[in-house]
Amino acid sequence: MEPLDIELDEGELELPAEPMHLNMGPSHPAMHGTVRMVLELSGETIAKVDVQVGYLHRGFEKMCERGTWAQVFPYVDRLNYVSPMLNNVGYALAVEKLCGLSVPDRCQWYRMALGELARISDHLTCDGAMAMELGAFTPFLWFIKAREMVWDILEEETGARLTHSFGRIGGMAEPPTPDFKKLCLAALPEILHIVEEGERMLLNNRIFLDRLENVGPISKADAVALGWTGPCLRATGVSYDIRKAHPYLKYDEVDFEVPVGTRGDTLDRFLVRLGEIRQSKRIIEQSLERMADSGPVNCDDPRVVLPPKSEVYTTIEATIQHFKLIMEGAKVPAGEVYSYTEAGNGELGYYLVSDGSGTPYRVRIRPPCFQIVGGVSKLIEGRMLADIVPTFGSLNMIGGECDH
Amino acid sequence: MSQLVLDKLKERFGAAILETHSNFGDDTAVVDAAQWKAIAKFLREDPALDFDLPVDLCGVDYPNRLPRMEVVMHLYSIARHHRVRIKARVGDEDMDGAELDSVVSIWPGFNWLEREVFDMSGVRFRGHPDLRRILMYPEFEGHPLQRTYPADRTQPLVPYRTEDEAGMPLNKLEPFGHDEGMPFGRVGPHPHAEDN
Amino acid sequence: MGDMSNANRSLTIDGSEQGFATTKVDALLGWARKYSLFAYPFITACCGMEFMALNSPRFDLARFGAEAPRFSPRQSDLLWVVGTISQRQGPVLKRIYEQMMEPKWVFAFGTCASSGGFYDNYTTVPGIDKIIPVDVYIPGCPPRPEAVLDGLMLLQDKIARGERRAGVVKPRVDPAEHVKELVQLRRSANDPSELAPGLLAGVRK
């Protein structure tokens, strides 16, 4: 090119720049469900982002008002669909709080074991998907293989791989199978081995660490003010875990730690989840040791628990009880209650309003990732476009839960 | 659950606290809607209460009484381990006057929650930076979680294909009619308040 | 929506195409298309988890040549609609379908995509066939990966035949005729309480 032979100021050569609007989603290549981010970019840097959720709004709360209390279980499964057992247990606990019931010990250990298996499945999926989106396809497949082992156990217990609808008010749908303990104890070391292999592959990789470290940080105060809970909050350094702070089921009788991060960046969120998988394994092992091999799983209250089928076919009282429970629903006492458990993403709360009949008056779910995704703009603004992928992946936004 | 929270509220706000109860272990206070923001600020800033985690905000519709819409806010304090539920009732039968002050300036976490309450229940929040629908699309009319909104009234954005266009039947069989799956003896307006 | 006259011109292939020399171009095209489907995974909800499982080594969609996801509608020919489509998502789905180029096929994965599932309410499209034409419907909530693979094979048969009509297709094999061959997954034949050997496949000893 010929050299310029006129003197020019720097400013005159600059091209006029306008921010570029880029639309990410709602059909997202990163398999997170559907979120639309309208970005205003200047170069590669994000000036503003408008996160639009609601593309998977399925009217869960309205549907609950049309059925019975027990008919809510399938809807609840499909909220956080990577760890449906935790949602089931949370809802069952909420209704039991309203009814004033407490389930037998065997059921509590069983719920804990299944819930922690679901938590393992959730964290494996989140971390695997995050690795995949950064290009590391192999650890994703390994984690999915580990997840298949968890799903095999859940399928053996509940009959379904993903959406079990296994919880019931006052207990569970079926007692544990005789092989449950054997299966879990065989699978858990294997799952941990796969997690360790994945870790070795990822955490020594300079590129992976560079893409996660110091990306999308958030401070403790900001995270708390935004209503964050769960692994995303614990990555910032706040060790708020409902299983420790307000123990439910038998969490106060098992020994486990709560992994806590320091900087609140994407790497910490990734590592906190891996740490939680290990703690979940400890909890499951202890629960299985303590769980009795025989004994009732459902509590004895005829107002909420279905009678055994053999009695339904032979005695009239059981037939009537069965009929009333199925057709009219369990008559839960009038009142309102807010019950919360530690789900895969944080504090999963159910605010139930009952008018004393078998139909719920209002079922409100407090989705943990709704608040978390509400804070995404704080994490991404000022960073580059490519940082959205690991940051958003580390938040584990589950569309069914966020958009309920 | 301790009574500390409710006692301090009653002490500070007196008549603005209309009712309190601790049924099922949850401390609840029904407050005057005009004092919503002041009470929220007190709960946040008082050192003994220290409610720093915004947990939830939702609307519950009681169309048979006035005011009709009850806005329910749950708060938690991480340091003190206590929770509280604050409720306020707004709105008449047509949802006129269903307005509350926004508490986004106190807890940024309520930004999306208030948008959701607006979207689903129709309560407006004064002072909210960006009050628009969040779960439904902007062209949607009505507020779905109000009890008077029929559950199956759809407002499609894309007109449905006709059977001629498709060359095959598109409507699935309804073996039991539109009452299928509904419990007997349910209380409340029929979810199909109007025919499709 | 496809060329209806194709149905008359192409051959019906039965049996395997391998080692079967054809002279009809349609048959060759059908064979090539069905074993090299480029998928556009339009994933919204829980069925996405089964879709991930489908791509994983255990159920291995790659055996069918259909594992390559192309995240641009211009480059894909099979639209996997996985999960519930809400009314808000409807225009997006339609737009993506319209942007795909012929020949294209649509796979309704799951009950929510086939008929709206149990979300009979103000916000769900009661089946994506209200918006776009669908070739194969896979019921299930979520469907087992084996069911999806069965549907994929049905779709492959359909592509091989060059058929463009939407809707219900007969299963390839009527299970009632093959009762004795049904696989017992859980228990071995000798001892009912013994775990079936393949249950924890991949577990190292």
Image: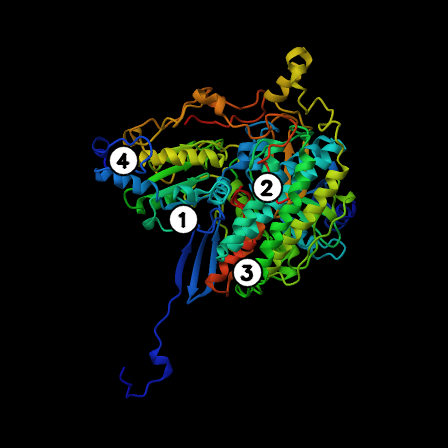
Please give the name of the residue rendered at 42% of the width and 31% of the height, measured from the top-left corner: C115
Please state the horizontal and vertical placement of residue B166, each as a whole percent of the image. 30, 31
Does the rendering let one see residue B111?
Answer: no
Say which chain tag 4 marks. C
Q: Identify whether C45 is placed above or below A330.
A: below
Tag 3, which secondary structure? helix
Q: Amino acid at mark 2?
A: Met
Please give the name of the residue rendered at 70% of the width and 55% of the height, measured from the top-left corner: A239
* Marks 3 and 4 belong to one chain: no
The residue pinned by badge 3 equals: A379
Please state the horizontal and vertical placement of residue A41, each as a whole percent of the image. 43, 63
The residue pinned by badge 1 equals: C69
Q: Amino acid at mark 4?
A: Gly
Q: CA distance from mark 3 to mark 4?
A: 50 Å
| Disc 2 and disc 4 in contact, CB within 8 angstroms | no
The residue pinned by badge 2 equals: A149
| Disc 2 and disc 1 in contact, CB within 8 angstroms | no
The residue pinned by badge 4 equals: C162
Tag 1, which secondary structure? loop
Please give the name of the residue rendered at 60% of the width and 50% of the height, measured from the top-left corner: A194
Q: Which is more N-terminal, label 4 or label 1?
A: 1
Say which chain tag 3 marks. A
Which circle, 2 or 1, is nearer the viewer? 2
- Residue count near mark 1 (Cα–Cα under 10 Å), binned few <14, some 14–19, many ≥20: some
Scheme of image coloration: rainbow
Q: Amino acid at mark 1?
A: Pro
Q: CA distance from mark 3 to mark 1?
A: 29 Å
Which circle, 3 or 1, is nearer the viewer? 1
Tag 2, which secondary structure? helix
* Marks 3 and 1 belong to one chain: no
